[in-house]
Image: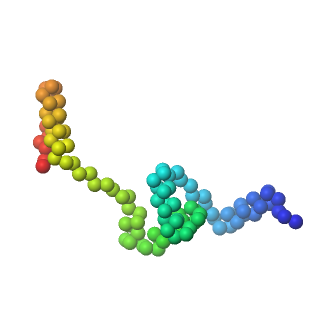
């Protein structure tokens, strides 16, 4: 005779307790979700939980030094063009001229 839903739930709960299983959940934006979907497609993985678990296991297997690049937050370099710097400088000077310098104000010369 098939198990009832309550029996299946109880069995699953007992299994989770036995293995000290914890639920791991988090929200992600569309871009990150698309990257996960692409990783899954590359490797024929259909379950997100499996993909995340494999990523964690493989990153951990790399060790502290080698996994550093995999877990580091990607940073974007910001390059300020000469046009933008010049425009900013001109507007800053105009603002200073409109608003006189008061005691305690600090003026920092631009670096090029």
Q: Is residue 111 left or right of residue 8?
A: left
Q: Is residue 43 left or right of residue 82?
A: right
Residue 73 pos. (x, y %): 38, 58
Q: Residue at 12% across / 28% down in the picture? A: 97
Residue 44 pos. (x, y %): 55, 69
| Number of marks | 0
Relative height, residue 51 to residue 84 (above, below): below
Q: Residue at 16% across / 47% down in the picture? A: 82
Q: Is 49 in front, or is 9?
A: 49
Q: Quadrant of the image for the N terminus?
A: bottom right
Taking the image as drawn, is residue 104 in sight?
Answer: no
Q: Residue at 46% across / 59% down in the picture? A: 35
Taking the image as drawn, is residue 67 in sight?
Answer: yes
Q: Is residue 53 left or right of residue 110?
A: right
Q: Determine which quarter of the picture holds residue 19.
A: bottom right
Relative height, residue 17 to residue 31 (above, below): below
Q: Is 41 in front, or is 53?
A: 41
Residue 74 pos. (x, y %): 36, 58
Residue 62 pos. (x, y %): 43, 73
Q: Determine which quarter of the picture holds residue 85.
A: top left
Q: Residue at 52% across / 51% down in the picture? A: 27
Protein image colouring: rainbow
Q: Is residue 111 left or right of residue 12?
A: left
């Amino acid at each position: 005779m098939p198990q009832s839903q309550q029996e299946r739930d109880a069995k699953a709960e007992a299994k989770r307790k036995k293995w000290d299983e914890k639920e791991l959940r988090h929200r992600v934006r569309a871009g990150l979700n698309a990257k996960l979907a692409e990783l899954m497609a590359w490797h024929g993985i259909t379950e997100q939980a499996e993909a995340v678990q494999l990523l964690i296991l493989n990153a951990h297997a790399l060790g502290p030094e080698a996994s550093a690049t995999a877990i580091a937050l990607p940073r974007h370099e910001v390059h300020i063009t000469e046009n933008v710097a010049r425009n900013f400088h001109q507007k800053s000077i105009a603002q200073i001229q409109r608003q006189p310098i008061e005691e305690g104000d600090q003026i920092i010369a631009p670096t090029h």
